[in-house]
Image (cartoon, coloured by chain):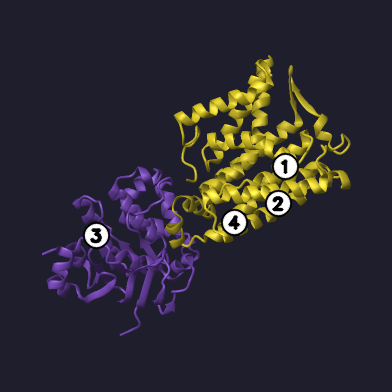
Chain colours: A purple, B yellow
């Protein structure tokens, strides 16, 4: 098999004295959708934040497309094709929808083609074109999530990280967001979804990782994880 | 007639307040740094204008060719230093106040604590004015207002329309996420520090045209300029301009119809009232924060 697009090995992450991840290893191949599930506090968000360069790694190695990005300063990671939809969306509330999206194309490689990217985002989320001039903070939760996903797409990522995209959304809005994720993946973008809504994430993923207390507990095909006792116990509470 | 003259003069003087306040406001809004050293840079800008114009017999406005790049570098260097120190909003107040005291001390060592003013021969603007009917406008205040309007308009357009401007607003709202999209916070803060330094050169030049300089002048700016920043809304360039005009008019009119001594009393009462009613700033409509 070819080299994975994302390879995380022996990753330790700390917040001061508190360690959040121990020896975490995951891989994502070109074109895959991978989901990371686990209970609250398992370290799921920490993992994607470390990959996106928002939080530094303490030990271990993160490589994207064969390039070691572990020690890069945060703003350089996106240049290697990583974009994140952070937990709680974290759009820029006092900027317009359009400005939020255009900011997504800030990195050098994406800037020149930002008009084409914008057309692509509006194709997936037509509602954002209608709302372009509004302040992003004035939108509904579902629309804000579209802004967050659209902003990430503007960076023209090879790897899209989504942290709890269903959080706080009405079920029908969750459907819309997940439909969009599938369509984005079909366009050739590899996807990592971190979710508490396990059923939902496993349904679109090829492979999955179960995190527990900062370690990878289980890894395998999504179907196998769905039926595993560990997942049922630790996340679904069955 | 008196009141009309006072109002219009107030509008024009408000331009100078806005020019002094704009840089402070944007640095505060975008970088969360309350840079009191900005007053020091304005002071140096004023003294440099005085010195260069006097010794080289240069038109004071032309001294900008030297002072703007010099103050750009100074502003950028200060911001670079602040960034290395990893200052919080409150610490920045303390550190930059220390820096301001140093700057004032150095200025008084170089230029002494006596009043310095450009001679009439060096500074042709001081004695010129434009008369419209019975209303008279000194050229110096017209220049201040024009420059302020230009700076505010340029800053507004840059913040709205350019990648760097959007990045600065994004930093103000969520620095970590802006970083994840490639925004290099350190580089932009040094750039912003430089541009703000350049506006200090403009403000200093304009101030030196119509005023005698003494190092303590920097402290006298505090009250009015902070009032303008807070009324305008932190980080709001257009709001700062509007607030500058409001403060200028209020002081001008109160001085004319009542007494100059009453101006600060009325001004700061109005500010307290404004903060009670609109704590985010009177003119806050969607700036950087």
Residues at marks 1 and 3 touching, judged by CB atoms closer than 8 Å: no
- The reply to whether label 3 and label 2 mark residues of one chain is no
Q: Locate residue B146: give its quadrant.
A: top right
Whether residue B146 appears in this view of the structure is: no
Look at mark 3 in the image and give the residue it sits on. Answer: A178
Q: Is residue A146 left or right of residue A61?
A: left
At horizontal 22% and vertical 55% (from top left) the residue drawn is: A174
Look at mark 1 in the image and give the residue it sits on. Answer: B204
At horizontal 77% and vertical 33% (from top left) the residue drawn is: B210
Q: Which mark is residue B82?
A: 4
Residues at marks 1 and 2 touching, judged by CB atoms closer than 8 Å: yes
Q: CA distance from mark 4 to mark 3?
A: 44 Å
**Closer-to-camera residue (A204/A85):** A85
Q: CA distance from mark 1 to mark 3?
A: 57 Å
Q: CA distance from mark 3 to mark 2?
A: 52 Å
Q: Nearer the viewer, mark 1 or mark 3?
A: 1
> Could you classify mark 1 by the number of other residues whose Cα lies within 10 Å: few (under 14), some (14-19), or many (20 or more)?
many
Q: Give residue A162's position: percent from left, percent from top.
A: 31, 62
Q: Locate residue B241: give its quadrant.
A: top right
Whether residue B143 appears in this view of the structure is: yes
Q: Give residue B183's position: percent from left, percent from top.
A: 49, 60
Q: Is residue B277 left or right of residue B78?
A: left
Q: Nearer the viewer, mark 1 or mark 4?
A: 4
Above or below: residue A20 compared with residue A126: below
Q: Assign a secondary structure to mark 3.
A: helix
> Could you classify mark 2 by the number of other residues whose Cα lies within 10 Å: few (under 14), some (14-19), or many (20 or more)?
many
């Amino acid at each position: 098999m070819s080299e994975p697009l994302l390879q995380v090995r022996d990753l330790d992450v700390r917040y001061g004295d508190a360690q959040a991840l121990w020896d975490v290893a995951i891989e994502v191949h070109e074109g895959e959708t991978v989901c990371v599930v686990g209970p609250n506090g398992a370290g799921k968000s920490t993992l994607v934040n470390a990959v996106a360069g928002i939080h530094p790694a303490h030990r271990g190695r993160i490589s994207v497309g064969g390039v070691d990005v572990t020690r890069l300063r945060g703003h350089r990671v996106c240049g290697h094709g990583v974009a994140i939809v952070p937990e709680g969306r974290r759009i820029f509330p006092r900027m317009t929808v359009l400005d939020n999206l255009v900011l997504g194309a800030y990195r050098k490689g994406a800037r020149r083609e930002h008009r084409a990217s914008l057309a692509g985002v509006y194709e997936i989320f037509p509602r954002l074109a209608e709302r372009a001039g509004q302040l992003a903070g004035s939108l509904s939760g579902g629309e804000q999530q579209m802004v967050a996903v659209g902003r990430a797409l503007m960076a023209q990522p090879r790897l899209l990280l989504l942290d709890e995209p269903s959080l706080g959304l009405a079920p029908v809005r969750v459907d819309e967001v997940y439909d969009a994720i599938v369509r984005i993946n079909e366009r050739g973008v590899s996807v990592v979804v971190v979710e508490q809504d396990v059923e939902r994430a496993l349904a679109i993923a090829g492979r999955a990782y179960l995190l527990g207390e900062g370690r990878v507990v289980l890894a395998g095909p999504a179907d196998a994880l769905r039926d595993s006792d560990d997942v049922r116990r630790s996340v679904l509470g069955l | 007639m008196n009141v009309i003259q006072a109002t219009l003069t107030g509008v024009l003087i408000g331009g100078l307040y806005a020019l002094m306040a704009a840089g402070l406001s944007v640095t505060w809004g975008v970088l969360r740094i309350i840079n009191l050293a900005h007053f020091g840079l304005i002071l140096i800008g004023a003294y440099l204008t005085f010195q260069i114009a006097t010794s080289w017999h240069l038109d004071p406005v032309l001294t900008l060719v030297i002072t703007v790049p010099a103050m750009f570098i100074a502003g950028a260097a200060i911001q670079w230093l602040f960034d290395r120190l990893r200052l919080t909003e409150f610490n920045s107040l303390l550190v930059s106040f220390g820096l301001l005291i140093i700057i004032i001390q150095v200025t008084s060592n170089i230029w002494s604590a006596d009043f310095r003013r450009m001679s009439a021969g060096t500074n042709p603007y001081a004695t010129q004015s434009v008369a419209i009917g019975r209303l008279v406008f000194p050229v110096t205040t017209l220049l201040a207002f024009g420059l302020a309007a230009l700076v505010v308009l340029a800053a507004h357009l840059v913040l709205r329309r350019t990648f760097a401007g959007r990045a600065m607003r994004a930093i103000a709202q969520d620095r970590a996420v802006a970083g994840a999209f490639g925004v290099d916070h350190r580089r932009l803060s040094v750039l912003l520090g430089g541009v703000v330094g350049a506006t200090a050169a403009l403000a200093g030049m304009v101030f030196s045209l119509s005023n005698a300089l003494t190092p303590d002048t920097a402290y006298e700016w505090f009250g009015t300029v902070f009032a303008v920043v807070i009324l305008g809304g932190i980080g709001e360039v257009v709001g700062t301009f509007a607030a500058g005009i409001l403060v200028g008019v209020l002081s001008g009119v109160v001085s004319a119809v009542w007494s100059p001594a009453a101006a600060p009393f009325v001004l700061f009462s109005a500010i307290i009232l404004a903060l009670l009613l609109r704590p985010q700033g009177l003119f806050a409509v969607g700036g950087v924060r």
